[in-house]
Amino acid sequence: MTQWVLGIDIGGTTLKAGLVDRAGRFRAERSQSSRLPDRETFRRALETVIAELGAEADGRPAVAAVGIGCKGTVAPGARRVRSLPGAFSFLEGAPLDRWIERALQQRLEVRLDNDARAALAGERRWGAARGKDDVVLLTLGSGVGGAIVSHGRMLGGHAGVAGHLGHIGVEIDGPACSCGNRGCLEAIFSARAIEGEALAAIRRGCESRLYERFAARPEELTCLDVFAAAGEGDAVAGAIVSRGVAALGAALAGIAAALDPDLFLVGGQIAEAGEVLLDPLRRDLHFRTSRLLRRRIPIRRAALGERAGVAGAAALGWDALETTSGG
């Protein structure tokens, strides 16, 4: 009988789940909005999704373990989110393991971790970091997250906060960040930060492709539009991208000096810009680190794409299952 792990990705807008086998193949998937008003409504929605997927497996015992990726701070080895500010604060301390066992009507291994660490677990098992024991992942979206594997071990830190790479300081007197600090990478090179810079230039009337395309509809602008304009040679967009790449390159150089990784991975919305981002970033990182490291650290896009959240969560489940069974 084929074994399946249930991967659950609790995202900011969507709750996704899927059955994933040891080779990373999906059997069935479900999703629904995660923008729910309270803990009880969320619990019912989660249990419905899980029960539907449980019925898709080859008999309920075939669901061998569950992995969950969720934003927030997760203590190492915990099954509950310790800190989750914002709209999902009602999930702090929620007994996710019991909800899942009730929906599947069985007791089983449940592994929970921060969504970025889950994504890196998936990339190591099935994606762009296979075979790598020293890897740093940055998720570049509306915020900037991250995860670190060193000597084959995922770093959680003393309080489970390790990997919040978006809050590395890259400008002493830089813009205010949501964390309360100033000059964090996230405040300069997140999707929101890039879009904010571009919208400010449009409102000032700066002549550019961005102004021509979005002055009458600024709400439609995305960070990928800024990268596209930069790739077309637009000076305003190019300046925004160059500043952001310099900030990201500085952050990566600091991480490289501290951790000496074998590989950097970048994922998230901004990574979809492709070589418009990666080519100058590789040059910048090499310039900053070549004398110290005497080598080039590869920078690759994460490989799992839209399924990264569920696949990463499933990888947590497979890791837990193999650790428990010894293989």
Image (cartoon, rainbow, N blue to C red):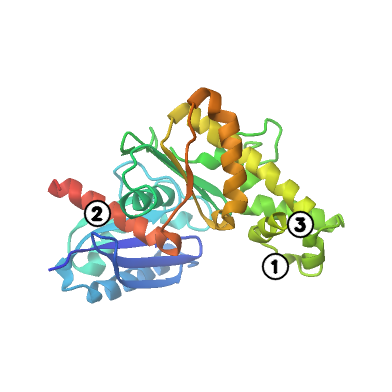
Q: Which mark is residue 279?
A: none
What is the secondary structure assignment of the residue under circle 3? helix
Q: Is residue 278 above or below residue 295?
A: below
User: Front-most of 175 and 178?
Assistant: 175
Q: Given contact means CB atoms under 8 Å apart, are the residues at marks 2 and 3 in contact?
A: no
- The local crowd at label 2, few if under 14, some if 14 to 19, many if 20 or more residues have their Cα within 10 Å, is many
Residue at 49%, 35% (x, y): give it: 296
Amino acid, disc 3: Leu
Residue at position x 65%, y 54% in the image: 192
Q: Kindly identify the amino acid type of the residue bearing the numbered disc 2.
A: Trp
Locate residue 255, reporting x and y percent.
50, 32
Which amino acid lies under the numbered mark 1 shown in the image of this protein? Glu
Location of residue 242 (image quadrant): top right
> Mark 2 or 3 closer to N-term?
3
Q: Which residue is mark 3?
A: 199
The residue tagged 2 is: 318
Q: Secondary structure at mark 1?
A: helix
Residue, x 52% and y 55% (percent of image)?
268
User: Could you tell me if the residues under marks 1 and 2 are in contact, i.e. CB atoms within 8 Å?
Assistant: no
Q: Is residue 124 above or below residue 199?
A: above
Question: Do the CB atoms of the residues marked 1 and 3 lie less than 8 Å apart?
Answer: no
Q: CA distance from mark 1 to mark 2?
A: 40 Å
Q: Earlier in the sequence, mark 1 or mark 2?
A: 1
Q: Is residue 229 visible?
A: yes
Q: How many numbered marks appear?
A: 3
* Residue 109, image x, y percentages: 21, 54
Circle nearer the N terminus (1, 3): 3
Q: Nearer the viewer, residue 278 or 67?
A: 278
Apparent side of residue 93 relative to residue 299 in the rendered image (left or right): left
Of 88 and 203, the residue lying toward us: 203
Q: Which mark is residue 220?
A: 1
